[in-house]
Image (cartoon, rainbow, N blue to C red):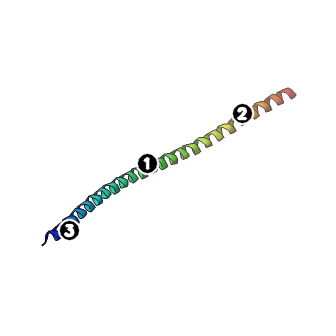
């Protein structure tokens, strides 16, 4: 093997080494991005479950408020009816 061929082979090996380093770096970045995406999706899932819990609690609260409002109006109507009836008598 001549000196020229050795230098050419050495340059090729250096380029392969650089390419391997780049590939390793890219692989690490891809792995990091995968972990970041997993954390983001886990956070989204947590937010979804919290939102569902809040929506359920809000629906229950609204039904209780509606029932309490009906009872209050029933009491007010009864008081007004009693007062009106007692004024007639």
Q: Quadrant of residue 61?
A: top right
18 or 72: nearer the viewer: 18
Residue occupied by mark 2: 75
| Tags 2 and 3 touching, CB below 8 Å | no
- Name the one closer to the observer, 52 or 67: 52
- Disc number lying in front (2 or 3): 3
Crowd rating for badge 3 (residues with CA inside 10 Å; few <14, some 14–19, many 20+): few
How far across and how far down the image is residue 1, in percent?
12, 73
Residue 63: x, y in percent?
Answer: 62, 43
Mark 3 touches mark 1? (CB < 8 Å):
no
> What residue did someone put label 1 on?
43
For label 1, the SS is: helix
Looking at the image, the residue that sits furthest to the right is 88
**Earlier residue among tags 2 and 3:** 3
| Neighbourhood count class around disc 1 (C-alpha, 10 Å): few under 14, some 14–19, many 20 upward | few
Label placed on residue 77: none
* Res 8 label: 3
**Which sits in the foreground, 2 or 39?**
2
| Residue 41 appears left or right of 29 | right
* Helix, strand or loop under label 2: helix
Upstream in sequence: badge 3 or badge 1: 3
Q: Quadrant of residue 26?
A: bottom left
Q: Residue furthest left?
A: 1
**Which residue is depicted at the point 24% across and 64% down?**
16
Residues under labels 2 and 3: Cα distance?
99 Å
Residue 58 in the image: state x and y as whole percent: 57, 43
Residue 48 can be seen, yes or no: yes
Residue drawn at point x = 42 percent, y = 50 percent: 40
- Find the distance from the CA under tag 3 to the CA under tag 1: 52 Å
Q: Name the quarter where the C terminus is drawn.
A: top right
Vertical side of 83 occupied by 56: above or below: below
């Amino acid at each position: 093997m001549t000196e020229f061929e050795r230098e050419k082979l050495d340059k090729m090996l250096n380029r392969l080494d650089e390419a391997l380093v780049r590939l390793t770096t890219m692989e690490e970045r891809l792995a990091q991005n995968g972990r970041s995406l997993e954390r983001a999706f886990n956070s989204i899932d947590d937010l979804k479950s919290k939102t569902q819990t809040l929506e359920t609690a809000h629906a229950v609260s609204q039904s209780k408020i509606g029932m309490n409002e009906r009872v209050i109006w029933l009491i007010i109507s009864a008081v007004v009816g009693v007062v009106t009836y007692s004024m007639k008598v």
